[in-house]
Image: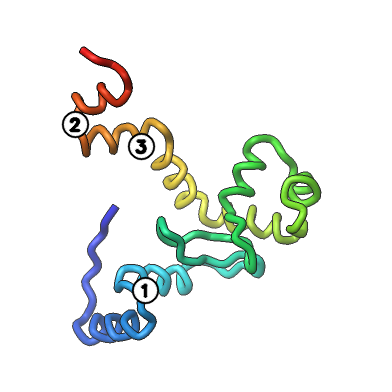
Amino acid sequence: METIVQLPQALYDLAVEQAHSQRKSLDHYVAELLAERLLPPHAHVEVIPSRSGLRAVVRGTRIGVDVIIGYVQAGATPQEVAQELLPDLTLAQVYDALSYYEDQRLLFDKEIEANTVIAWQKRLQEQIGTTAMSRLLGQHE
């Protein structure tokens, strides 16, 4: 989803300069900056760039908050996540990830909804068309 935000020219120029100096795209730089400024601080969670955009992970690891949430939603307790499923994490890290999720539930839930099989199939069908999608799914007419 793209949203357009208008900035004063001087602020836009400064953002372009900063993005260039950090060798980032303007969109990526601004998204990181806004996430840093707008998201509540969590001692054990950081937002890092990934191939698909920004991702909340347990600080110092590549373990995504979404992974922890998935385990808990599948029925694991925070203790099981820390002790058995992701033993490199402390219980404090797991609870902070859960707290981060609660603070950002709307964003996470939108991301989860956008990445369901049905949502991916719909986007693919929009890109390649109904006939090609039917062939891909083995539904020849």
Label 3 residue SS = helix
Between marks 2 and 3, how big is the CA–CA gap?
A: 13 Å
Q: Quadrant of the C terminus?
A: top left
Quadrant of the rendered image containing residue 17: bottom left
Between marks 1 and 3, how big is the CA–CA gap?
A: 27 Å
- The tag earlier along the polypeptide, 1 or 2, is 1
Q: Residue 29, labelled with which disc?
A: 1
Label 2 residue SS = loop
Quadrant of the rendered image containing residue 20: bottom left
- The tag earlier along the polypeptide, 1 or 3, is 1
Label 3, on which residue?
120
On the image, the x and y values in percent for residue 73 come to 62, 38
Above or below, 94 relative to 125: below
Q: Amino acid at mark 3?
A: Trp
Q: Residue 42, labelled with which disc?
A: none
Please, which colouring scheme is shown? Answer: rainbow
- The tag earlier along the polypeptide, 2 or 3, is 3
Q: Residue at x 41, y 59 (%)?
A: 53
Q: Amino acid at mark 2?
A: Gly
On the image, the x and y values in percent for residue 46 come to 57, 67
Q: Which of these two is toward me, 24 or 140?
A: 140
- Report the mark closest to the observer, 1 or 2: 2
Residue 36 horizontal side relative to residue 93, left or right: left
Q: Residue at x 70, y 56 (%)?
A: 95
Label 2, on which residue?
129
